[in-house]
Amino acid sequence: MVKAGTIRSAHPLASLRERGVLAALFLLLLAVVTPAQAIEPGDLTLTVTPDLPGGAQPYAREMVLLRLRGVYRTQILLEEMRQPALVNFSWTQLGRDHWGRTRLPDGQMALEFERTIAVFPQHTGTFTIDPFIHRLTINDGGERKQIDVRSEPVPFPVAAWTGAGGGPDAPEPWWLPARDVSITDSWDPDPETLNKGDTARRIVTLEAQGMLAEGLPPRPVMRTRGIITFAGPVKRETLITPSGPVARATYQWDIKKGVSEVIPLDAIKIPWFDTLTRTQREAEIPARQIGGGLADREEDLKPAAPASWPALAAAALAAFGLGLALIGFRTGSARLRLDRGQARRLRLAAAAGDAAAFRAALGRAAQAQPDLAALWRSEPDLARDLAALDRTVFGQTAESEAPLDLPDLARRLARPRRLGPSAALAPEPRLAPLDGPVAQA
């Protein structure tokens, strides 16, 4: 939690002393170019405005931006902002103060001061944000004078939750008010390649805009039949941006496969409250499959039993007959197809709708099996769709062109092809190779 009395800057390398020196130099420069004149009512104003999306009252632990703005029609020699205690709030300052010049409605120029603070009410109720005090040392008619510019108190009601379930005070589910929530999920190695006894590391990163890191939920429970889970440390961090803090939590597990069967790992749903649309939503740690991508049954891993002599004799006779049958052909025909790993990568990219990943997987398959890639290019329909894939990836798709059906393309590419008896394949059409952009015909 960011405690009252502490300012977190978006530029940690700049010390407060350095910022104070820069501000003082800026104000002294303005004092040189601004003529001295007597202070009149309305020349010095400081306002504090809560930024409420849609004008709705916030809920507990929801971020609200306080925008401070001072307009000063006088010379300023020194300045110091005195902030109230902000009891019942957590808060953090977003970046540095901004000083500039603004034109007033009467056409006169004035100094403008701006600061943005993110506050998080901790409870439901009606609170008041006490005045901020900007202590200025000014030149009043040629006389050096110190004056305090006070903002007005700001009423700050925090609404009680009226939804069907959840809310700030409910123990379950975790209350997560944010502007946006995103989840990334990574495994090393791929969980589908695990055999019994193998271990993979899963890392899930949860990122919420408009929150502090301590507001993110604890590590989810990752448990199902057939796996042994070792939970790792949780890393939390808050990134300060001009639009508000961004909270990030990284959860880690080491998962060991304890059985030979394929294990389905269910999705984990994380409910959150969208502070922009004022609605409940859900983020999801995706479901995965452990095992099944490679042979993971114990009987497949056991060494084959030695064959009997009658079986060996029958096999030798069959091989001899097959050899006789092939004699006389100039060259044998062969069936070419994607291996299991290549086909699976294409299916996963197609299911995700990721044309770039699909094309990258296809390029690796074409490099591994150039003869198969040549057969693809020799089929007019498939060559046309491969060209459409290139246009999609490289941003050359026409507005009238129908979207490419990646799952269907993955199925067609996975079909086996027969390499004919002739060693010469059909001439390559004017189609870009799979590892480069499409050439214009």
Image (cartoon, rainbow, N blue to C red):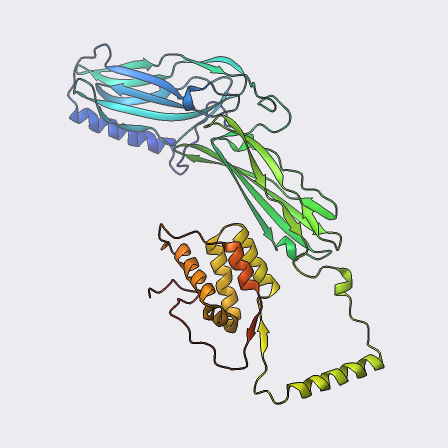
Q: What residue is drawn where x is 62% and y is 29%?
A: 173
> Where is residue 341, by image quadrant?
bottom right
Q: Is residue 227 left or right of residue 8?
A: right
Q: Is residue 322 left or right of residue 83?
A: right
In front here: 85 or 398? 398
Q: Is residue 68 left or right of residue 403?
A: left
Residue 52 seen: no
Q: Is residue 427 above or below residue 258?
A: below
Residue extending farthest to the top is: 41
**How far from the left and from the top, in percent, is residue 102?**
22, 25
Q: Is residue 399 above or below residue 134?
A: below
Q: What residue is drawn where x is 54% and y is 16%?
A: 160
Q: What residue is drawn where x is 59% and y is 58%?
A: 344
In front here: 33 or 425? 425
**How far from the left and from the top, in percent, is residue 226?**
74, 48
Q: Is residue 323 above or below residue 268?
A: below
> Where is residue 414, by image quadrant?
bottom right
**How far from the left and from the top, in percent, is residue 166?**
60, 24
> Where is residue 332, by image quadrant?
bottom right
**How far from the left and from the top, in percent, is residue 404?**
46, 54
User: Where is the C terminus found, in terms of image quarters?
Assistant: bottom left
In front here: 82 or 269? 269
Numbered-mark total: 0
Residue extending farthest to the bottom is: 328
In front here: 256 or 334? 334
